[in-house]
Image (cartoon, rainbow, N blue to C red):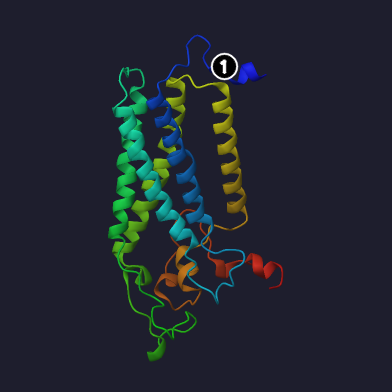
Amino acid sequence: MIDLLFAPIDPTRAHDVSLGMAWHGRLMFLAWGIICPLVIVSARYFKILDKQAWPQELDNRFWWRSHWIGQTFAMGLSCIGLALILWTPGLSGEAWLHRVTGYAILALGSVQLLSGFFRGSKGGPTHPSWDGTAHGAPDDEPVHGDHFDMTRRRLLFERVHRTVGYTTLMLVAVTILNGMWAANAPIWMWAMVGGWWTALISAAVWLQLHDHAYDTYQAIYGPNPDLPGNRMPQQGWRTVRPSTIILPRQRIGE
């Protein structure tokens, strides 16, 4: 069994990679095969935590911090991985698809990072007395912003950011599998990647079926129907507004 697991996936070719190529693969898989899917899951399904007393407690920052920190760290690892493969001598042209999709991923990842600078202002509960439950009274009037008012700029940002993110994720799967095939990776690597992705997809499906894909606007600003974003359809594919479902804390009577 051990011999089988360490055997290359294609027995007609040798698994012989240089040190630079090996570390290129490790860093890129860590960045794009582990970190990026995790921060996407975090951003989609952890806008409201089970222990959070929503809507009294609004704007949980866990998902936001993990998303941008994870993306930035992944791009940093990618730069190191790119430098390693560019400085590795003797590369052949056999992995042309891996090279093309890899550069496409780096370009899309850069777009994602840069798009954050164009998301507009936030607005909303910046006034100390505003708790998200009242709107319109002079002492409770929130500061206006692109996100709070859901301006055209904000709507465009959200559509572009989501589209680019999910497109990148699909390219990542193609690129990793193609790179593993080009390197003739041993069977244990294929089993590890397959097991990790199976677990990640299973967790995402469970979270989706249990209504954890919360609408970003209500997660941040609350369920008040008078708020600008709550008068619009929720953004994103198959998201739910927490005001329309029973949250986990409510299920256990808290």
Q: Position of residue 58 (x, y in %)?
A: 50, 72
| In the rendered image, the vertical position of residue 22 relative to residue 66, given as above or below | above
Please name the residue shown 51% across and 51% down the image.
41
Can you name the residue that lies furthest to the right here?
Answer: 252
Residue 137 is at least partly visible in this image = no
Q: Quadrant of the N terminus?
A: top right
Look at mark 1 in the image and give the residue it sits on: 7
Give the mark count: 1
Left or right: where 31 falls relative to 105: right
Q: Nearer the viewer, residue 52 or 168?
A: 52
Q: Secondary structure at mark 1?
A: loop
Q: Nearer the viewer, residue 245 or 91?
A: 91
Q: Position of residue 129 (x, y in %)?
A: 44, 86
Residue 4 is at least partly visible in this image = yes
Q: Position of residue 65 (x, y in %)?
A: 44, 59
Q: Quadrant of the C terminus?
A: bottom right
Left or right: where 113 falls relative to 226: left
Q: Nearer the viewer, residue 240 or 180?
A: 180
Please name the residue shown 45% across and 33% down the image.
26
Please name the residue shown 36% across and 44% down the image.
75
| In the rendered image, the vertical position of residue 157 relative to residue 95, given as above or below | below
Graded by Cα atoms within 10 Å as few (under 14), some (14 to 19) or many (20 or more), the crowding at tag 1 reads some
Q: Amino acid at mark 1?
A: Ala
Please name the residue shown 29% across and 52% down the image.
114
